[in-house]
Amino acid sequence: EDLFLPLPDDILVPFSESSEQIYALLDALPTMFRDTKASESCMGSAVKGAFMAMKHIGGKLLVFGACIPSVGELSLKSTRDNPRLLGTDREVELLRPVSEGYKDLGAELTRAQISVEMFLAPQQYIDLASISPLAKYTGG
């Protein structure tokens, strides 16, 4: 569960100097992971790792997600997906975050001048109320 960042000083490169390698990586990503059947996400840990790598320079972080972050730090459970609450006085509970974890992480990112833009394409419940503070509080 401990987050490990192997090369914090060398993990980010100037685009102008490494554009060919970056494009090659982006082109290779679909084939590298085409047989992956994993349907879990460690979004909280991934964002914290990106924060550790970027905190000394700031910048923009793009987060792409397709399922609820269910593994690692700031993991969430999909047990809040309760259709029986819809249309009742208790529906507002679904619009509140489960915890302040993502809001606190957003505050840390803001102090390091890192903005987060999120692109989410879920096919199931994703608890947007809990993870949206990342974008909301960082200006993403």
Image (spheres, helix red, strand yellow):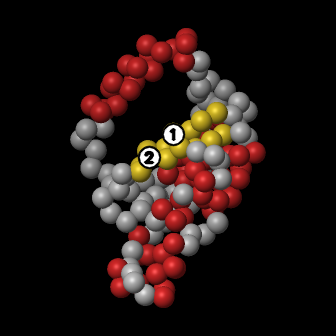
Q: Nearer the viewer, residue 16 or 87?
A: 87
**Residue 22 shows which numbered tag?**
none
Q: Which residue appears at 66% of the width and 26% of the height? A: 9
Spot occupied by residue 30 in the image (x, y as percentages of width and height): 30, 33
Mark 2 element type: strand
Q: Is residue 62 above or below residue 93?
A: above
Indicate whether 16 appears above or below 92: above
Residue farthest toward the right in the current orientation of the protein: 111
The Cα atoms of the two marked residues, 1 and 2, are separated by 8 Å
Q: Looking at this view, is 28 or 57 the one in front?
A: 57
Which amino acid lies under the numbered mark 2 shown in the image of this protein?
Answer: Phe
Decide if residue 126 is on the left or right side of residue 32: right
Q: Secondary structure at mark 1?
A: strand
Instruction: Locate residue 125 relative to residue 92 in the image: left or right.
Output: left
Residue neighbourhood size for the residue with mark 1, other residues' Cα within 10 Å, grouped as few (<14), some (14–19), many (≥20): few
* Residue 34, percent from left and from top: 25, 38
Residue 77 screen position, x and y as percent: 45, 69
Q: How many marks?
A: 2
- Which residue has dot 2 on it? 119
Residue 4 showing in the rendered view: no
User: Residue shown at 71%/46% (left/top)?
Assistant: 110
Residue 35 lies in quadrant:
top left
Instruction: Say which residue appears at 44% left-offset and 75% top-offset.
Output: 80
Q: How dense is the environment of label 2, judged by Cα within 10 Å: few (below 14), some, or many (20 and up)?
A: few
Q: Kindly identify the amino acid type of the residue bearing the numbered disc 1.
A: Leu
Q: Earlier in the sequence, mark 1 or mark 2?
A: 1
The residue at which mark 1 appears reads as 62
